[in-house]
Amino acid sequence: MAVDKKKTPASAGKKPAAKKADTAPVKKKAAPAAVKPAAKTAPKAKPAAPKKESPKSSVKSQTIKSVLPKKGKPAPSPKKSVSKPAEPSPKKPERAKPDAKKADNSPSWMTASSEDITQYMNPGAPKKDEGDKKDRRMIVIWYAVLLLGLLLGTVMTILNAGNPANPWGNGGMTNIININDTSQNAEVQKLLARAEEYLRYEEFDRALDLVDTAEDIEPNNPKIDELRKMIIEKKKLKDAQKQNPTIIVQNTSPVDTGIDTGKKPVDTVKKPEPVVTLPTDGLSPQEKAKQLIVNGIKYRKAGYYDKAVDSFEEAKKLDPNNADAWAEEGLAYYDKGDKQKAMDQARQALGKDPNHPTAHYTLGKIFFDEKLYDDARSELSKSVQSNPNNADAHFMLGVIAYLKADYQTARKEFTATINIDPSFKKVYYNLGLTYSKLSDNNNALKYFEQSIQKDPENYKPLLNVGYLYYDNKQYQKAVNFLEKSIAVNPTAKAYQKLGNAYEEMKNYNKALKAYEKSYSMDSGDFLTAYNYARMLANFGNHASAVKMYQQSISLKNDYASSHINLGNSYLALKEYTEAEASYNKGLQFNTKDSDAYIGLGTLYLKRGDYDKALKNFKEAVDLNPYSSTGYKGMGDAYVKSGIYDDAVGAYKSALDKDPTDIETMVALADIFYKTKNYPDAINYYEKSIKLSGGKNADAYFRLGECYILQQNNDQAKKVFSELKTKFPKYENIGKVDSYLSGL
């Protein structure tokens, strides 16, 4: 089975960090008007605030990055493909700083109250004239209830000490991190303790807010960063559990190396003629016949079939009713390759002994060879009833059960084969396959490895072990066994799976070579061409990718992912008409594919048709509510239409789905900058810089301008100085120098 993944113009999954799928140059954001440095005696200059534009304008002073097809994780099993707009790899995410004016964010179970309790517990509350006695009785009752509750709480705390499920305090609950080791600052310890409590209740956003506040106090504390990463990881895991993405094709078939249907192999080495004992004159005809049968069996096992047949013929003349002579002669004819005579002799034997194991075994082998599996199973079952020690009969029964998907029976028969004859090499591989079908990977691995030891020239167990390690995300081990399999017997499937493994390891150069080799060995497999196309697109070679996608489609026209990925490559080549046709063709085969709508949304965004773009991005998030790319596209469409409030909402939804999306953070910060919301702009620029490791010069530049507009010249100077150090050749370095000279 070859794995594949479909790439869309913007995927919500992992993406390769290799060259972007979209090779079209991205326009730089227009910088704000340069501010002339102030004269030495004049007050310091401030950057001109951006002009307010009409809501219907298309925001040209700032080119927000649109959802370009980036590299999605090319991988190899019919899922989706490699032309999605790449999203950044996860780095340290931050959350928006909590609003100081915000109400207490304590969990609901900490803030319950009652109007009655408030009235009766307030000493200054006016008392009613009527029912005063009743009121006093109520006070007594409330106090009794409170005291009883406190008493029960104390008892439960004692009883539940050490119980990790105990919600009353942490009686025995192990802290996620040792709070006392995190900081010497009591306020930081308090914030992290509360963050950890929120984490336990899966209130991830509140936990992240508290972690951010703690980091503001101690910005370089590694323990704070450790807790943040833990919260992000658990949040992503929780989101993944909720997600139910649409998969166009899920190939659930086993590794297509096929079960070994061969019987116990006949030794091809010519053996010396066996020494036999001729019947003596003093024996009865029946005893002479028995001796001749023994001699015939020796001749058959040594490969001297004609002499074996002669011995059995003599035995039949001496004792015509001896079923052994007829049955063994039938088996000799089978081994010789004359199945018709073999069948005739076996039936003659059964006429004399209806339960004769060798006769049933011979018929079973003949039916097995002719793929008449029901008849074969019937004959072989009768054979093992009379002779349960026939390893080959058990083996063939196991193969028949496997082919009929009766894996428990197959396991039983293959195990019986090993118990009878541990030297039977082929059975170990088949038993490994059977355990794979039973989802018992540990036993599957055990028997595949035994097969490798007993039959090192058999590439199939090596290939299957590679598949097992791949499926369990142990990619380096998968590579090791796949390469060993290729060394024994190079196959297109082995190279294709090797490409899968290299992709997961982000070794895209080797993945490309593996897919290319796979295609050169089997250009008639649609998936081979498809995976090769994805990796070509991943490296930006869209012209070649288009040809490979077309080749894949010519082999299997109804595979939606091929059409959608073809659309992505056309989009990267700016062949918009062809891209639109490909996306719509993909939707003919799968109307529920959110990636096709993302591709169309991206296409219309490039064409300037923002209404159609927005419609398609909305369709994408309706189909996949967890698509950060879909929300990002909606935000881009709103920005292009000048509808900033809705753009902010869309971008925030995108960040909720993927809090590590740097591009969306910058886009959101740009909106806040343009609408003069400088505190929020600063917040998101700073977050994007942290997550990117300070790789976005434009984010530094805008952040510095925001600080100037906020009259925080010290921070502005720090930001511009860092920008100048990191990006000495920045295109707006002249403006940076101008700002610095005035600060």
Image (spheres, grey):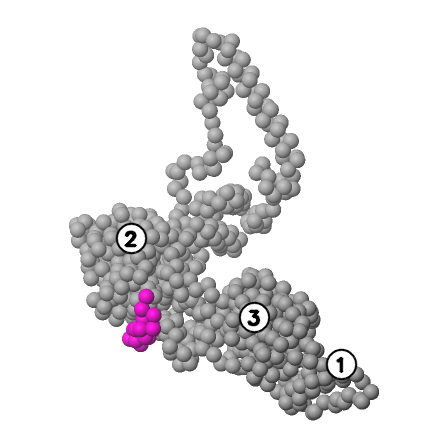
Q: Nearer the viewer, mark 1 or mark 3?
A: 1
Which residue is labeled 3 in the image? Answer: 376
Magenta residues?
543-558
**How crowded is the residue under tag 3: few (<14 C-alpha within 10 Å), some, or many (20+)?**
many
Disc 3 versus disc 2: distance between alpha carbons? 55 Å
**Residue at 41% across, 53% down:** 244
The answer to whether residue 122 is seen in the rendering is no
Please check the rendered image and state whether residue 552 is part of the magenta-colored stretch, yes or no: yes
Q: Position of residue 160 (x, y in %)?
A: 64, 37
Say the numbered circle drawn on residue 619: 2
Q: Position of residue 728 (x, y in %)?
A: 34, 68
Q: SS class of the residue under badge 1?
A: helix
Contact flag, marks 1 and 3 (Cβ < 8 Å): no
Which residue is labeled 1 in the image? Answer: 286
Give 104 or 717, whichever is nearer the viewer: 104
Horizontally, residue 525 falls left or right of residue 455, namely left
